[in-house]
Image: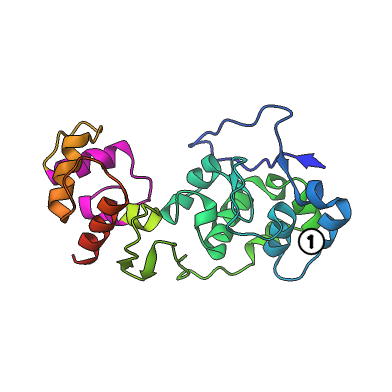
Amino acid sequence: MFYSPKHAAPKSAPVRRRLAGVAVTSVAAVGGATAMAQSASAGGTVWDRVAACESGGNWAINTGNGYYGGLQFSYSTWKGFGGQRYATTANKASKGQQIEIAQKVLKTQGPGAWPVCSKRAGLTRENGAAVATPAAEVPVSRDTVRPGLLAVDGRKGPATRRAIESWIGGSVNGSLSKADTRLLEKKVGGTVNGGFNRSDVRKLQKLVGATADGSWGPKTTAALQRHLNAR
């Protein structure tokens, strides 16, 4: 069985809907309609049941189909309903944070935002809104070792990107956008054009104590992580 989730960003942040025939594969498409029905009727909250149907209950899923997390948010929907204060895409946010954004979608669009799985899970505006979400829940990124410190692993993961953005006074959403890049160039005394060329990389490397060869690889990232941890 194939279907397309219909949840979309609010009108203030329009999204481009899928073309006809381009759909997300549900659990049923993989394991059959019986498997979907069993997953959707599983225990937990109503949102657990929706997630079981949408993604097999995998809140960190990213299959490359353009939909993310347990409730299969598109990038535009997640951004439009404020999800990027937690993570760039839903799969990088915690379960509680995904449910919080889903409740906003539910309030605006109703259960039809999940046209198949809402019916199988028994989702309504009332029971979906009644699920408590822990406000203090924060996902632990793979590139953190404990709150406030980055793992020095040479990987430019979401926590490292957010730390860079915080360091330069940028967006702090893990996107490391072109505007953030210009701020980074300014921070290191570079060209400030958003290109971050080899000369800019060398200036960054000198600042963080890496070999100034103009190539931003894992060793440079690791040196930057150490520099950020020492602040």
Amino acid on which disc 1 is placed: Ser
As displayed, is residue 180 above or below residue 226? Answer: above
Q: Is residue 109 visible?
A: yes
| Residue 41 falls in image quadrant | bottom right
Q: Is residue 127 visible?
A: no
State the scheme by which the image is colored. rainbow
Quadrant into which the N terminus falls: top right
Residue 51 picture location, percent across and down: 69, 58
As displayed, is residue 199 above or below residue 46? Answer: above
Give the side of residue 76 with respect to residue 122, left or right. Answer: left
Query: In percent of the image, x 19 and y 66: which residue is there?
Result: 230
User: For the image shown, how many numbered marks are present on the structure?
Assistant: 1
**Is 183 a magenta residue?**
yes
Residue 206 picture location, percent across and down: 13, 49
As displayed, is residue 134 above or below residue 226? Answer: below
Query: In percent of the image, x 37 and y 70: which residue is there?
Result: 145
**Is 27 a magenta residue?**
no
Q: Could you tell me which secondary element the residue under label 1 belongs to?
A: helix
Query: In percent of the image, x 71 and y 36: which residue is there?
Result: 23
Q: Main secondary structure of the magenta part?
A: helix
Quadrant into which the C terminus falls: bottom left
Which residue position is annotated with label 1? 39
Which stretch did the figure color magenta?
Answer: 163-188
